[in-house]
Amino acid sequence: MADAAMDKGAVRRILDSAKAAGRSSLTAPEGKEICDAYGIAVPQEAVARSASEAASLATKMGFPVVLKIVSPDILHKTEAGGVLVGLASDDEVAQGYATILANAKKYKADAKIDGVQVQQMLNGGQEVIVGAVTDGSFGKLIAFGMGGVLVEVLKDITFRLAPATKDDALSMLDGIQAAEMLKGVRGSEPVSRDALANLIVRVSQLISDFPEISEMDLNPVFATAKGAVAADVRIVMDFNPAPQRHRPSQEEILASMNRIMRPDAVAVIGASAEDGKIGNSVMKNLINGGYQGKIYPIHPKAEEIMGLKAYKSVKDVIGEIDVAVFAIPAKFVAAALIECGEKKIPGAVLIPSGFAETGNVEGQDEIQAIGRKYNVRLMGPNIYGFYYTWKNLCATFCTAYDVRGHAALSSQSGGIGMAIIGFSRSAKMGVSAIVGLGNKSDLDEDDLLTFFEQDENTHIIAQHCEDLKDGRSFAEIAKRVTKKKPVVMLKAGRTSAGARAASSHTGALAGNDKIYEDVLKQCGVIRARSLRDMLDFARGIPKLPTPKGENVVIITGAGGSGVLLSDACVDNDVRLMAMPPDLDAAFRKFIPPFGAAGNPVDITGGEPPATYKNTVKLGLEDERIHSLILGYWHTIVTPPMVFAHLIVDVVEEMKAKGIHKPIVASLAGDVQVEEAAEFLYDHGIPSYAYSTEIPVAVLGAKYKWARGAGLLG
Amino acid sequence: MADAAMDKGAVRRILDSAKAAGRSSLTAPEGKEICDAYGIAVPQEAVARSASEAASLATKMGFPVVLKIVSPDILHKTEAGGVLVGLASDDEVAQGYATILANAKKYKADAKIDGVQVQQMLNGGQEVIVGAVTDGSFGKLIAFGMGGVLVEVLKDITFRLAPATKDDALSMLDGIQAAEMLKGVRGSEPVSRDALANLIVRVSQLISDFPEISEMDLNPVFATAKGAVAADVRIVMDFNPAPQRHRPSQEEILASMNRIMRPDAVAVIGASAEDGKIGNSVMKNLINGGYQGKIYPIHPKAEEIMGLKAYKSVKDVIGEIDVAVFAIPAKFVAAALIECGEKKIPGAVLIPSGFAETGNVEGQDEIQAIGRKYNVRLMGPNIYGFYYTWKNLCATFCTAYDVRGHAALSSQSGGIGMAIIGFSRSAKMGVSAIVGLGNKSDLDEDDLLTFFEQDENTHIIAQHCEDLKDGRSFAEIAKRVTKKKPVVMLKAGRTSAGARAASSHTGALAGNDKIYEDVLKQCGVIRARSLRDMLDFARGIPKLPTPKGENVVIITGAGGSGVLLSDACVDNDVRLMAMPPDLDAAFRKFIPPFGAAGNPVDITGGEPPATYKNTVKLGLEDERIHSLILGYWHTIVTPPMVFAHLIVDVVEEMKAKGIHKPIVASLAGDVQVEEAAEFLYDHGIPSYAYSTEIPVAVLGAKYKWARGAGLLG
């Protein structure tokens, strides 16, 4: 069944005939035919003309079966003894055939008998639902859930982009809350994962091959140890799908983005010498930020602005311009944008507000059309601009930012952008870029992914968004990028209240959050649940080397921290290693007799620096351990900075030997632990004072990424 | 049924006879009798001797019913046509009676007919489970869940302390994930909440009245629109229950605790003049901390320690001593404790480790017995001691702490205690007390609750614990205390990994976390999910006035923050008010035309201080709004400190008019927002930089408390 061919021609004929007839849904027989064409099992049926034929048909379709007399002269089949159910072997079927014929003769001696219908009987197993929908952002999605109340009441359903691979399909079987039911409960046999996954794959292929199939419901599907059969099929078509969003090729995107994000020449349209003007702030940020490329102020009258020759139009500039930053009112944007197009500037940073977010949808449509016509990529409008620290580029009117590093962040909202700047500065998070996306009239998250993927200064990408205008594109690109670099997303509007707020904010229709949840995971994107999580992940993940495996050990001076750290491991899917006896014995050598080995390794409070040092060293040296979580307890015997220095020393010593494992730390103590945490963080060990959960969440995020990227084997 | 008497005598007879017979479980008929005695509905049955009697019996027990021939001469009832099912009216029953008798006659003319059994037929409705268990810590608990896979696979079950009130029982019906099923799904009728709640109440009363009933299962219970009937009852007894933990009366606890926590005279057993000794640290902390009561150093040889006269034994001290702080090795504790007992000191603070936590269970049992014998309450052993700031009392060897305030915190673990100290100092959280509970050989969380309840310096109580040795006591006291003061609990060992770590840490058996979850909620305790949450709640909750109602409005300058704040409201059960049209119009007057009113009120970025001021003022003045969440976006038009000052001014202005509502704020901006957040916090407005979730979590915790305490009406 898994390898059965998919007969596209047969499906095409059925869809075409439905379209010709002006129908938007298919009849049950048509649905069955389509399933047959794609190797999606439906209850089989055939007419036998002899007992042996009935037996062989039944054997082929699988037991049990139902037998029904086929005769134009017998209307009340049951009354005539013409129906037998639950026949479970070829012998029973053969005998049943004879019985039915004999009963029919008895009932009506002269009845014309055409044969006996053999029909596969569905019962037992688990009732599940397989469905398909067309999402405005993500396109074709395949859905899977358990039948009945589990889907209806508990919404226990999971989605994947279609077409789904066999692995995707198998992950769906594990991706519902009630997954255990498929493994057999109350003594029932486990269902065939293979058969069910194949059915999911085939349905997902069908809706991908035929975009006009907008919805599909296989409900229920009977999943048993032997197979998966759809008892009922509903197919709905939409022959006038929404036009696809324009997508340049990856090469085109990259060519523009490299010039926009790392420009050698910037024009400031609306540059101003007047304090308080946006065009003045942008000029100051560019010049004072230390940007070394060419800066062309554009102003209708000025000869010179802040010591630089000014131009009336970008067209008056002799050299090439890579990006134009707009600091003029909305109403003047279109005309200036045309000039940018004529000057062949690949990108426009549209700071001005007053477009779709204020109801001026036509204005936004207009500039969008100009951008498309002249091939000018648009960032915004309604944004703070962007930063690219490695070029000392501060193309924004906001506070300057210059702490170079390797995290690239973007936000759909200006406020969140400012929070990113503040946190980054305060936490000394090195940043490669911060980008405002605002109304996303053109450039969006996937354009940024395409750029940051190959930007050598960027090691992690973190994005705040309220919607993905083209989730399908994002997903496809994210799947590729996450194999190389971690991608974190804070998807706002998770809840219905949040979604309402989002739609009043940007006019974006918030998607079903469960779809985002599942698709982001399918693409290997780490989802942040809160703003602080996104910021902590962006800061911490790049500090950690990629773990070589799942075995994590907690070493703690505070037993109480050990318990909370263990809780946090479960919450963040960080897997505590079962401690092998020899390793347990090795740890015990270093800790007091009343300390607890196992995992956590509880070295007990009041231990001298040597105990921390010996146990951490052992944890790093033993190859079976892949990551460490440290719980420090402030005592006078091992003060915070002593602990911090000794840990950094051990880590450096091990690095010199080629050993480099992820370590995070939770510091419990008086305020001196804050300095110790900062010192540790600066030395590559994400550490947090007064928190047992954040360090583990950061490690967990690193693991999520590594798993998604297939780096843990 | 709700008011049916409960026949204790009948139950007592059945249990006694089972006990006499050496049985630990009951037979089905015994179970049925017990249910009958307590008005717990089971399928009814009776024998009718005439058609009209059958009809009247059936009418009494409710339709449908089953009729079965009762005859010693008819063994195969069905074969004899002696069984009829699903009779749905009195007519059908009367006719059925006649049919059965006729059939019986036909089957065996001379059969002796004793009558026809009329039996209530259970079907339709929802299958649910009601159960009872005896928990080692919480004692009798009642459980409720949906039948089948929902309990078995999804563990969708909820617990309450028994006996449960009708309100408790009703809250259980809403407390499962699949609660919607009880309201009628797929066109089925909603079940009778009243009948189901009454059944729960009665079962909970039964197990409370008869402690020897250790387990009970009513599975399934058929819940319909008309009633709730237990189809199967299983009862297990334990006639040798574990002895109850000793509990002094609340008056006794209070008398001791007031002397221990606010002592006028402290003895330091093992006081020392030698730097680095614990007995020296304690002395320094007491003296340098500014404690004004008497301090008696106890030392076998010294004449004087740190300028204070030393004594060989507490018994040599002339005056009363309220508490003795132990700073001597474990092996000397017992003897010194006896002297404390003889001196009638009400409390001993046992800093020494080396007891149960190191395997020395006998040692701990010994001191526990001494404490009981002499009526000395024991804090610890294995603790850092405790702080009571309003007495300048630093009875610990840890870093000194003196920032007075109104949060009382305790921890089971020393490391977590140090984290509490560090955070409190760093965040300038005023503290009334910090207490280490360690091994909890005697004093535990509920003793602290009893003390803090009436301590005028304490406005909130936050406790970290790994287990509750006497959950029942805690729950009973917490129920009372939470009506007056918020109680926050960080229960460590939530997860199975955490529980394993907890048991290696303190030897405590971690309870089923779902039990903790439900019982804490039943008692009005706010559960913190993480250490940081506990600390933030302890800091923030007392700052907020108690809200007068559930209507919360978000006012934000950053639309993006509004979306994230809305998400956080849903996550934290903070309820966004549906904005009345007149209020919406009133807000719109103050915001730009493209701003979004509704809720969140999006005043848009770049607005001057007046816009924040006008909208916040309106939010405070309108009586329909009960709490505000502010989202600030850092701009040059309204810089962070300008925002902070204007908000504090508006709040003060309103306070002068008698208006005082909870306000929290999320600040998005560059690092200056940190100072603004601190300023706002100092002025009673819990505010966080770079976080949209923490301020809402704090407000949500205040709401949880107010709801539990019945303050929201």
Image (cartoon, coloured by chain):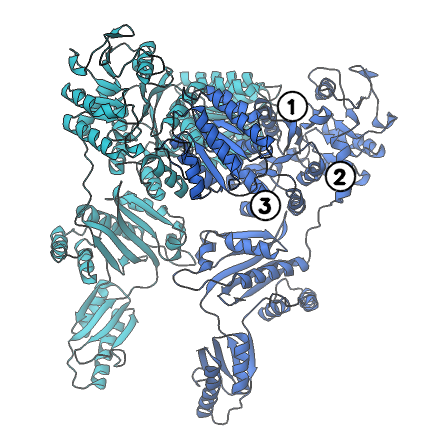
Chain colours: A blue, B cyan
Q: How crowded is mark 1: few (under 14 residues within 10 Å), some or many (20 or more)?
A: some
Visible residue check, residue A76? no
How far apart are the two marked residues, 1 and 3, measured between alpha carbons? 30 Å
Amino acid type at image mark 2: Leu
Q: How crowded is mark 3: few (under 14 residues within 10 Å), some or many (20 or more)?
A: many
Mark 1 or 3 closer to N-term? 1
Mark pair 2, 3: CA separation: 25 Å
Residue annotated with mark 3: A708
Residue type, numbered disc 3: Gly
Q: Quick one: SS at disc 2?
A: helix
Which residue was labeled with disc 1? A403
Question: x and y percent of residue B46 in the render?
Answer: 18, 67
Q: Closer to the camera, B622 or B400?
A: B400
Residue name at image x 24 percent, y 82 percent: B103
Q: What residue type is labelled 1?
A: Val
Q: Please indicate whether residue A707 sits to the left or right of residue B518 in the image.
A: right
Q: Which residue is tagged 2?
A: A254
Question: Which residue is outermost to the bottom?
Answer: A110
Q: From the image, state whether disc 2 or disc 1 is nearer to you.
A: 1
* B363 with respect to A597 (left or right): left
Tell if the residue under mark 2 belongs to the same chain as the one under mark 1.
Answer: yes
Would you identify the image quadrant in which residue B342 lies?
Answer: top left
User: Which chain letter matches label 3?
Assistant: A
* Residue B293 on image: x %, y %: 25, 11
| Horizontal side, residue A618 vs residue B544: left or right | right
Alpha carbon separation for disc pair 2 and 1: 25 Å
Q: Nearer the viewer, residue B442 or A559?
A: A559
| Residues indicated by labels 1 and 3 sit on the same polypeptide chain | yes
